[in-house]
Image (spheres, rainbow, N blue to C red):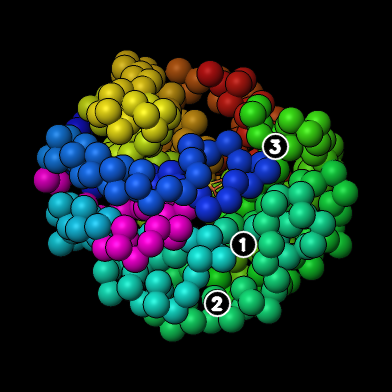
Amino acid sequence: MKTECKSVYLHIPFCRSICSYCDFCKVFYNEKWVMQYLDCLEEEIKDFYNGEKIETLYIGGGTPSSLSLKSLKRLMEIVHLLNTQNLQEFTFECNVNDLTEDLVKFLFENGVNRLSIGVESFHSEKLKYMGRNHDYKTVKEKISFCQKYIENINIDFIYGFSFENKKIVKKDLKQILSLKPKHISTYSLMIEEGTLLKIKGYERLNDDADADLYAFIKKYLKKKGYFHYEVSNFAIKGYESKHNLVYWHNEEYYGFGLGASGYLDKVRYTNTKSLTKYLKKERTGERIFLSNEDIRDHHLMLGFRLTSGFNIEEFERLYQVKLENIYPIKPLLKNGDLMIKKGNIFINPDKLYIMNEILLKMI
Ligand code: SF4
């Protein structure tokens, strides 16, 4: 069944400084490249966008907030190429150091209604390892003026450093909660190839301790009124990320920009991660053509990221199969890995930490 694509991701790869753990697609900020890049981004959109009414727009990076006011104005001109008459959610990623009242006012006046802010932690040793430098008082002031314009704020939180324990996590979460965000995205630290942490031989927390912290975070945030709706994401009810739900519902979306990924017409694609190539309009990176079986598998794998899982009847109608005939769900229901409630099948909340192992048993 073909539905109209209603989501767009735009990637801004520039960062003013590079964090030690980061393996995202990013480059050092350079104003000359920024303007060239935005010209190429505009061309890419003009070449591929079919004029659909966009409901969710996400500008991520890199650090979109690192752009100068001149570049931001240019970026917003590009956004206006999209049909935004039905736009419900417009997220803009910000580095906390870039936040000024003028910036937030500008974003608000240009339709941004959700900010995703990379706070990550307030713990001095964690910040040192990450290559970040902010303090609670400044962040609190900044978030307060953000909330005058845009109430829907996500805060990113990282845990999993070798010295980390519940006390550190609790203090971090307590401080994050005092900022009253509507949404919290949690990330367990990964030491990825090519990152500064990997080069320095840094080791993260062991898996058992990491699982304990994950269980603690879930319990703590639930107690504080945050709904755990996806493996790593928590929100005040009604503030779940509409854009990310498009991904987890296996729906189509455009991805524009350096290293951006999209999913259109049964193809999952990722643009080139080479800025030189992108600026020469050699955008093509990876292209994966999906069979109907692949799409079905993705529906299942992405759906299981949600704590509500997915609706069995809808799945069977969409793919014209009986779920239990395709995937070995019966033993997994029996051993408590999977559960069914109100027609939805989902991973047992107590076993979300081993989601990948459960998925491997099925696919
Ligand atoms: S974590 Fe974000 S701000 Fe830090 S280097 Fe990566 S993309 Fe840039």
Mark 3 in CB contact with mark 1 (< 8 angstroms): no
Is residue 253 rendered magenta in the image?
no
Which of labels 2 and 3 is toward the front? 3
Q: Which residue is mark 2?
A: 142
The numbered mark, 2 or 3, whose residue comes first in the sequence reads: 2
41 shown above or below 225: above
Name the residue nearer the viewer: 321 or 226.
226
Seen from this angle, which residue lies furthest left? 51
Residue 360 placement, left or right of 314: right
Query: From where the camera sits, is residue 215 visible?
Result: no
Which of labels 3 and 1 is toward the front? 3
Q: Which residue is mark 1?
A: 119
Queried on whether the Cβ of the residue with tag 3 lies below 8 angstroms from ligand 1, the answer reads: no
Residue 176 placement, left or right of 15: right
Report the residue at 41% width, 28% height from top: 274
Label 2 vs label 1: CA separation? 11 Å
Query: Which amino acid type is shown beneath numbered disc 2?
Result: Lys
- Which quadrant of the view contains residue 297? top left
Q: Secondary structure at mark 2?
A: helix
Q: Which mark is residue 196?
A: 3
Is residue 57 rendered magenta in the image?
yes
The numbered mark, 3 or 1, whose residue comes first in the sequence reads: 1
262 shown above or below 297: below
Report the residue at 32% width, 31% height from top: 278
| Magenta residues, start to end | 51-73
x and y percentages locating residue 256 in the rendered image: 30, 39
Q: Which mark is residue 206?
A: none
Label 2 vs label 3: CA separation? 29 Å
- Which quadrant of the view contains residue 119? bottom right
The numbered mark, 2 or 1, whose residue comes first in the sequence reads: 1
Name the residue nearer the viewer: 200 or 51.
200
